[in-house]
Amino acid sequence: MAKISDTAINGHFTGKDILSLDQFSPSDIQLLFKHVSDMAKIAKNAKASDLLKGNIVTLIFYEPSSRTFGSFSASVKQLGGQTVEIQNPQSFSSVSKGETLEDTMRVFEAYCDAIVIRHPVQGTAEKAAAACTAVPIINAGDGVGEHPTQALLDLYTIYEKHGRLDNLTGLAAGDILNGRTVHSLIKGLSLYEGNTLYLLSPEQLRLSKTDYDKFSKKGIKLIEISNENEIPKDCDFWYWTRVQKERFTDMQEYESVKNKFIITPKLLAEYGNENLIIMHPLPRVGEIETTIDDDDRAVYLKSQIRNGMYVRMALVALVLGRL
Ligand code: NCD
């Protein structure tokens, strides 16, 4: 299966790099979603699937990860494929000897059928994709840039609950400036009509002006707020995020903005509604009180997690031309 250099998905996932939500149209997203319930059945079934039999996927993560790494690894194995797994290549590979990203990619593309990469520098997945001519690259998070597979699973989780991805009102809270999951989610929601997203963050953690202008042009209504009492009571979802400590150079500044907005039972009672779902890409570091976890509306440790694996199973199988 050859790698395709076209970027837009346009109904064909096979051989494509998955770098950004910009590559998707609503029908591409629907095509992916069509396979997710089958993937859930496979995952729940004790019988092995051989959909990815003979396929090897490399996971190379230059930044820490639990869910993205774990779910990609499990996804490939659920479908009968195998993985080459490198976490922290800065310490445990020739990267520590000074090997360039391009060389590392060209080595691993010889061993496998696709490469999933996470890196602290924005744009690195694209760079990896340019270096890799033989196999597709999947962006598992590039610095403060994007996290497309997270957005796809987030969109699926919203779709599963509300049955649509248009005409939604949502709230994203926390680190909107540095949060790559929010950036990809905004792009995803922008593909559909009538969506409004409230962005609740400390002033310093608002979208950059460039991102705000760029995202607003795409058709989503973005409303920046800085106080909890501005949260509308008719939200379809809350998407809480962690303040991204690793993006700060000044720890005092981090301390001054972290956990400014915390979901407490009081906040939920005051601004939540019955149809709301509460999402978080995780890890949380205090911004959702654990007493919220058992609330039926809290999906971050429940369906959102499971959907992460099912959506990645479908995506990998599509990219490898097995669906
Ligand atoms: C997120 C990430 O890495 O961007 N985690 C994840 O992949 N689920 C969010 C975060 O680290 O805050």
Image: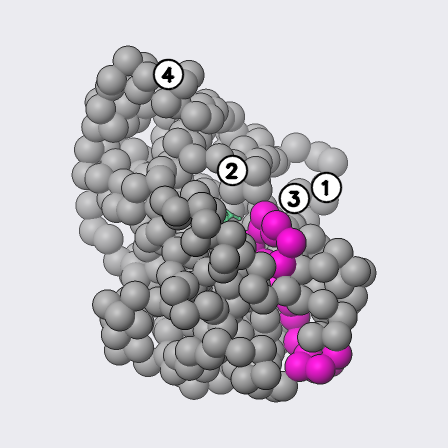
Q: Would you name the residue on which mark 4 appears?
A: 93
If you read the primary sequence from the N terminus, does the residue marked by circle 3 or circle 4 appear first? Answer: 3
* Mark carried by residue 42: 3
* Measured Cα–Cα span from mark 4 to mark 2: 17 Å
Q: Nearer the viewer, mark 3 or mark 4?
A: 4
At label 3, counting other C-alpha atoms closer than 10 Å, the crowd grade (few under 14, some 14-19, many 20 or more) is some
* Measured Cα–Cα span from mark 1 to mark 2: 26 Å
1 and 3 marks in contact (CB < 8 Å): yes
> Looking at mark 1, is its residue's CB closer than 8 Å to ligand 1?
no
57 sits to left or right of 133: right
* Measured Cα–Cα span from mark 3 to mark 4: 34 Å
Kind of residue sitting beneath label 3: Ile
Q: Nearer the viewer, mark 2 or mark 3?
A: 2
Quarter containing the N terminus: top left
Q: Would you name the residue on which mark 1 appears?
A: 45
**Magenta part, dominant SS:** loop
Q: Position of residue 204 (x, y in %)?
A: 39, 65
Q: Residue at x 75, y 79 (%)?
A: 269
> Looking at mark 2, is its residue's CB closer than 8 Å to ligand 1?
yes
Q: Position of residue 284 (x, y in %)?
A: 61, 51
Q: Position of residue 194 (x, y in %)?
A: 43, 85
Asked if residue 286 is positioned above or below residue 112 in the image, the reply reads below
If you read the primary sequence from the N terminus, does the residue marked by circle 4 or circle 1 appear first? Answer: 1
Q: Nearer the viewer, mark 1 or mark 2?
A: 2
Asked whether residue 285 is drawn in magenta, I would say yes
Kind of residue sitting beneath label 1: Asn
Q: Position of residue 232 (x, y in %)?
A: 57, 85
If you read the primary sequence from the N terminus, does the residue marked by circle 2 or circle 3 appear first? Answer: 3
What is the span of residues highlighted in magenta in the rendered image? 269-287
Kind of residue sitting beneath label 2: Ser
Q: Residue at x 53, y 56 (%)?
A: 258
* Mark carried by residue 65: 2
